Structure formats: C-alpha cells, structure tokens
Image (cartoon, rainbow, N blue to C red):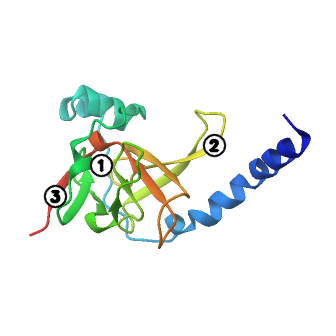
C-alpha cells in the first residue's frame, strides 16, 4: 500500500468516532421512548420464527434480495415484527440497491443505537427501542435530506398499510 493511501486510511479511521457522533446525533436527542418489552429467551423463541429470532435476538443478517418488503410501495409504516413498535414511515423508504429495505429517516424515539465491532471497521447498529431487537446498521451514504441509510433486515419488519 502506498504511504499516502495508508495515511488517508488512518486519518479516516481516526475520524470515524467523531463523524459517527455528529452524523447520528439525532438518535441521542431526548424523545418519547416506547414502553419496554422484556421477555425471556424462551418467550422470544415462542413469539418469533427461528429466522426472526436469529436476526432480532442474535444480531444475524438475512440474505440480500430475499425480503418481499423490497417491492412494497404503499403508504403506511414499517413496524418491528417482534413488538409492533412503528420504526419507519413508508415515505422515507428508498431503493438503495443493497438488497435490504432501506430508509433515510426513522420515527422519533423508535430506535436505539450502539457501536458494532463485529467487522474490522466499527459500524453503528440500530435496534428497536421497545424490545431491543436488532434491525440493521445505519450508514452515512443515504439520500437527502438526512444523508443516512438505515439498512434493515426485512424479516425483522412488518408493513402496516395506511388507513
């Protein structure tokens, strides 16, 4: 690797925590939080399919391009499949080309975040503020007006049509 490329890479890595804090600062604002849903592992296994349990409770990832929600175009909301907490308004959904349902904004108070170090590069994982279920990761490569991409496992969502 050329020295200049290495210096750039190290500089970006050093700024990642600062960038992450400013890009995702809205998530730290004080917002009305939903009532928490705290169940045992056995209760979650009873409530969820094995695939949903793997994604929501074990922070798994579904295969890209497998969610029927990729084709959903109606007005409504996307809620956590585990607890019915509304997470995203359908008007914020867009085609990211990643193979997972993607949104550029979330319903205030619906999500919590934490750093994920499963890969070499730290990422921001987000979860349902009500049940703590893992939904995906948020990146700063989304469209205006937020510039964010909430990349969600479709199996962790259910669509609720408007009306």
Closer to us: 91 or 126: 91
Closer to us: 54 or 119: 119
Residue 4 percent coordinates (x, y)? 88, 46
Residue at the spot of label 2: 122
Q: Distance between the residues labelled 2 and 3?
A: 32 Å
Mark 2 burial class by Cα count in 10 Å: few <14, some 14-19, many 20+: some
Residue at the spot of label 1: 37
* 94 with respect to 71 (left or right): right
Image: 129 above or below 51: below
Closer mark to the observer between disc 1 and disc 2: 2
Q: Which residue: 61% across, 37% down? A: 117
Q: Indicate which disc, 3 or 1, sits on the residue closer to the N terminus.
A: 1
Number of marks present in the image shown? 3
Residue at the spot of label 3: 160
Residue 125 percent coordinates (x, y)? 50, 46
Q: Indicate which disc, 1 or 2, sits on the residue closer to the N terminus.
A: 1
Residue 136 percent coordinates (x, y)? 43, 45
Image: 119 above or below 153: above
């Amino acid at each position: 690797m050329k020295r200049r490329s290495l210096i750039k890479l190290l500089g970006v890595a050093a700024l990642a925590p600062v960038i992450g804090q400013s890009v995702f600062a809205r998530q730290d604002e004080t917002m009305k939080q939903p009532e928490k849903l705290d169940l045992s592992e056995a209760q979650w296994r009873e409530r969820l399919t094995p695939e949903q349990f793997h994604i929501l409770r074990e922070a798994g990832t579904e295969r890209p391009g497998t969610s029927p929600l990729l084709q959903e175009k109606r007005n409504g909301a996307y809620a956590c499949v585990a607890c019915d907490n509304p997470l995203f308004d359908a008007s914020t959904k867009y085609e990211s080309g990643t193979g997972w349902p993607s949104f550029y904004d979330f319903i205030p108070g619906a999500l919590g975040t934490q750093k994920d170090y499963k890969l070499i590069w730290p990422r921001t994982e987000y979860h349902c503020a009500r049940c703590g279920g893992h939904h995906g990761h948020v990146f700063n490569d989304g469209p205006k007006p937020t510039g964010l991409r909430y990349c969600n496992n479709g199996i962790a969502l259910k669509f609720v049509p408007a009306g």
